[in-house]
Amino acid sequence: MEWWRIAGVAMMSTMGTGLAQDTGEIRLPPPETAGGMSLMQALQARHSTREFAGRALPPQELSNLLWAANGVNRPQSGQRTAPTAHDWREIDVYVTTADGAYRYDPPSHALIKVADGDLRPLAGVQDFVATVPVNLVYVADLERMSGAGAEDKAFYSATDAGFIAQNVYLYCASAGLAAVVRGLIDRDALGAALGLKKHQRIILAQSVGYPAGTR
């Protein structure tokens, strides 16, 4: 078997998972939706940290993390683990790692490649951002927010991104991962590197990895 370091995780070439090299798509393994801490224990353990180990997240961990963030939990309707005003589903989760940048596609539970190279230094200003295994970037597509004025678009997109960030915090607490959400970002530079359009707006970023000192 061959191993790649793709999207900040060690991806193994097997049937049904790994890299679809013709499309730049990573088909993630199905999320594990059983086990973990109770909700009250996860709330007790939830905290921000800015110190991370350097090792990558394995495919299953990344799969669980992204599903918890904003995955499809009701397949018949396509609705998500995080609420969204008017069911706009306007927030996209981007993943920046040492190997490239990807957009998470909840319906297919896959990562779609959007950029080559290491964009992590653009995902924040703190030193750890450039070396943490995964930076999640929450991007609002304002064109999906039909009928909303500028003020409502700003308010609801920020609120919906916050729901996703809290899902990530609680998953990380339950799974023994470290995380911190951040608002200080060079949005113009990162947006250009991700190929975002004028109607797409970076709301927040969130760094995720193993706690410092773990192996």
Image: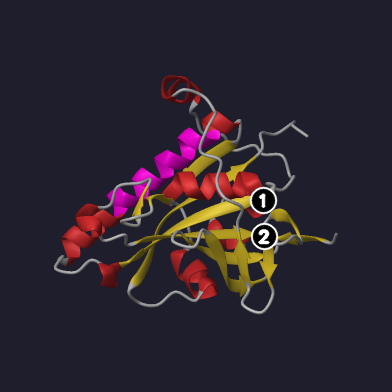
Q: Name the residue under label 2.
A: 17
Which range of residues does the magenta coloring cover? 158-172
In the figure, 182 relative to 98: above or below? above
Labelled pair 2, 1 in contact (Cβ < 8 Å): yes
Residue 53 position within the rendered picture, expressed as x and y whole percent measured from the top left: 72, 39
Foreground residue among 87 and 115: 87
Judge from the rendering whether residue 113 lies leftward or rightward of residue 181; answer left or right: right
Q: In which quarter of the image is the N terminus?
A: bottom right
The tag on residue 59 is 1
Residue drawn at 38 percent across, 45 percent down:
81
Does 205 lie within the magenta span?
Answer: no
Judged from the image, the secondary structure of the residue bearing numbered disc 2 is loop
Q: Residue at x 78, y 34 (%)?
A: 215
Is residue 9 at all visible to an observer of this figure? yes
Amino acid type of the residue that numbered disc 2 sits on in the rendered structure: Thr
Q: How crowded is mark 2: few (under 14 residues within 10 Å), some or many (20 or more)?
A: some
Q: In this view, does 31 lie above or below 51?
A: below
